Image (tube, rainbow, N blue to C red):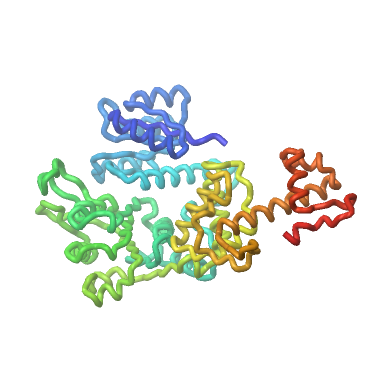
Amino acid sequence: MLRPTVLVVDDEESTRKYLARFLTSKGYGVDCLDSGDKVISRLKAGSRPSLLLLDILMPAISGLDVLGEMAKVGQFVPTIVLSAVGRVPTVVQAMRLGAADYLIKPFEESDLEQAIEKVLRICSLESSQPASESAPLADPFDFPSASPKILRLKELAGIVATKDVPVMILGESGVGKEVLARFIHARSSRRDQPFVKVNCAALPGELLESELFGHERGAFTGALREKPGQFELAHKGTIFLDEIGEMSCPLQAKLLQVLQDGEFIRLGGTRPVRVDARVLASTNKRLEAAVREGEFREDLFYRLNVIKFDIPPLRERREDIPVLFNHFVDKYQGQYNPNALPLPPAYLQVFQRYPWPGNVRELENLVKRFLILPDPELALAGLDEADTTSFPVNQEGARSLREVAALAAERAEKELILRTLKETNWNRRQAARKLNVCYKALLNKLHRWQMRGPSDGGANSAVAGS
């Protein structure tokens, strides 16, 4: 499987070098250009990358000019716009010209990686759909589940999505609060408008205020130019306030004003700015307790808490573990290891007993390790809280996860060898060739396990007693 190629277009050399290093480390093929006219020339010559990272402000030919030229000649390349200015009209114009997403500089690496994965996933779905079929595309914002609790939650979220009211999403870290927020946005009347995420726990109060509401030039030391806030960028769309329980009380008052009046004043500004953005909020705190202790405004709590979803942790919906494991394997296998072998069933038994303190995010990271690392035991090394009481024990009675993983791997190996020997009527040389192992190594294993074939006068079911 060919790895996706990303064409980085930016007139700043430092930005090109940084993006090239980062994207290469993530497994993408990368090429860089320093001007819009070179992009147009390359596209006209027939070169077509998987994705375009396009700066807006460039001399001579801007990013908007490049998008306009692509639209004019019918050359569609999935594009993520990189903008240092973030002016709402510019961003809107870029989206109308065909940009799939946009990021405001400086951006977080995780946001860039997520945006790239989302755009490539959507394009992959579109390209895999035969032109003659009229069936709808798979929903890239859906998420799989076998849990009655989650299926009911999805059903209710689909209903709430069409009602333009605030939504509060509760749950432990890693359960998928942002996934549910994007699910709601994708089913709302605002789905064609921006979805803007703000992590309220990542910035101190003053910086978070500037991030949310923007600032005027000279509002504080270092404010060399005006900057629109995330609320302005989310105009007509959805703003997702992640970990809102970490927001300071003074900032909560300003947020309440936006929810009540639909307007605010930038830092250092004098004129009100009107916005129309749907607010989705999430927290891993129990806000009722925070209200009682005076850490969260009661009026803001009731303004946000029109609809509430409480996502259960993964340990309370264990039927989702194999479903999510397979989902993440399908999602990342092409990127990390197209030839990955299936996970032995014994490991899934370990997963079912593990408490998953990091929830779905921890499971997703484990799948990445499983696909990247050559030894499943290494991928499972962090699951040291698993209850392994139903697994066989060694002579000392120890049940560490490393030992359990080794035993499970050995059992799976025995089962595979025995099945292959039966298929070859216990022709050991033929079995060794099919298993792609050394003949002598196979004999050593059979001797160590005391595994004998019918012609040896022994039972061939040594696996059962291992």
- Whether 32 is drawn above or below 345: the answer is above
The reply to whether residue 457 is in sight is yes
Q: Nearest the camera: 387 or 449?
A: 449
- Whether 171 is drawn above or below 77: the answer is below
How many numbered marks, from 0 up? 0
What residue lies at 37% left-to-right and 32% top-to-bottom? Answer: 8
Q: Nearest the camera: 148 or 13?
A: 13
Side (left or right) of 465 relative to 7: right
What residue lies at 19% left-to-right and 64% top-to-bottom? Answer: 257
Q: Nearest the camera: 64 or 1?
A: 1
- Whether 353 is drawn above or below 119: the answer is below
Side (left or right) of 2 relative to 461: left
Seen as rendered, the residue at the extreme bottom is 292
- Whether 295 is drawn above or below 376: the answer is below
Quadrant where the N terminus lies? top right
What residue lies at 75% left-to-right and 61% top-to-bottom? Answer: 465
Side (left or right) of 351 relative to 254: right
Side (left or right) of 103 relative to 373: left
In percent of width and height, residue 339 lies at: 61, 42
In percent of width and height, residue 47 lies at: 47, 26
Quadrant where the C terminus lies? bottom right
The reply to whether residue 261 is in sight is no
What residue lies at 32% left-to-right and 66% top-to-bottom? Answer: 166
In percent of width and height, residue 15 lies at: 30, 33
